[in-house]
Image (tube, helix red, strand yellow):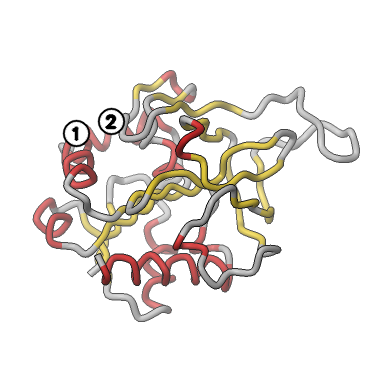
Amino acid sequence: MIAILDYRAGNLTSVKRALDHLDIPNEVTSNKDLLHSSLGIIFPGVGAAGSAMRNLRDNGLDNTIKSLVMSGKPMLGICLGCQVILDESLENTTATLGIIPGRCEKFSRNLSDESGHPISIPHMGWNNIWLKKECPLFKGIPENSEFYFVHSYYPVPDPAYIIGVTHYGLDFCSVFGRAGLWAMQFHPEKSGEPGLKILSNFYSYCLEK
């Protein structure tokens, strides 16, 4: 069973629907026993870093997640769940989980697109990812695939953890992590077949772990 972490940060239904479509056993939960017994955890989220961290701390889920990751439990962070595994976020000037070194920054309105026009914030819509290193979650996905983004802040992890980048006014990290711990700024559950393949590959990794 894949646990979808419920910490009142939204976006749970679409993740569950995607896993159900793939016939992947899953449960939306904040129950610590279920998180421990799961094959892996998907850490989704939509919203602000400050309220997300309050919700995690109020339920003691901050320490639970850190402990599970340290024990080797596979985890996939999505969007806000990707951002808060870093040390800090400039959104609400929030100290976050500190699982991977780095911070989260906001897109500047001084940035321009390819035509020289100011970018729109949030970054919303389909965009490419250029992989900087191999990642098992992208196995079988064509290089020109596009993924769905909705965000105003972007991760800036320690360069050693960068897996993929996306261009939107600047080249920003859109995928980072290490074996068994991955974080994605885009929404695989809303990214059609390429996104479903990422979720399927994550489940396969959890089964083999």
Q: Percent from the top left, x then y, of residue 24?
A: 33, 76
Mark 1 → mark 2, Cα distance in angstroms = 6 Å
Residue in the image at 41% along x and 47% along y: 45
In the structure shown, which secondary structural element does the residue marked by tag 2 occupy?
helix
Identify residue for label 1.
58
Vertical relation: 20 (above or below) 154: below
Q: How many marks?
A: 2
Q: Percent from the top left, x then y, of residue 123?
A: 66, 42
Vertical relation: 112 (above or below) 72: above
Residue in the image at 24% along x and 64% along y: 209
Residue in the image at 42% along x and 54% along y: 11
Mark 1 is surrounded, within 10 Å at the Cα level, by few (under 14), some (14 to 19) or many (20 or more) other residues, namely: few
| Quarter of the figure with residue 200 | bottom left
Observer-nearest of 130 and 84: 130
Q: Taking 148 as reference, is 81 left or right? A: left
Residue in the image at 31% along x and 35% along y: 99
Observer-nearest of 186 and 69: 69
Q: Taking 92 as reference, is 190 left or right? A: right
Q: Percent from the top left, x then y, of residue 52?
A: 34, 36
In the structure shown, which secondary structural element does the residue marked by tag 1 occupy?
helix
Q: Locate the N terminus and report the quarter of the image it occupies.
A: bottom left
Identify which amino acid the numbered label 2 is placed on: Arg
Q: Percent from the top left, x then y, of residue 145?
A: 66, 64
Identify which amino acid the numbered label 1 is placed on: Asp
Observer-nearest of 172 and 106: 172
Q: Which mark is residue 187?
A: none
Farthest left residue? 33
Mark 2 is surrounded, within 10 Å at the Cα level, by few (under 14), some (14 to 19) or many (20 or more) other residues, namely: some
Disc 1 + disc 2, Cβ < 8 Å = yes
Farthest top residue? 93
Identify residue for label 2.
54
Q: Taking 64 as reference, is 111 left or right? A: right
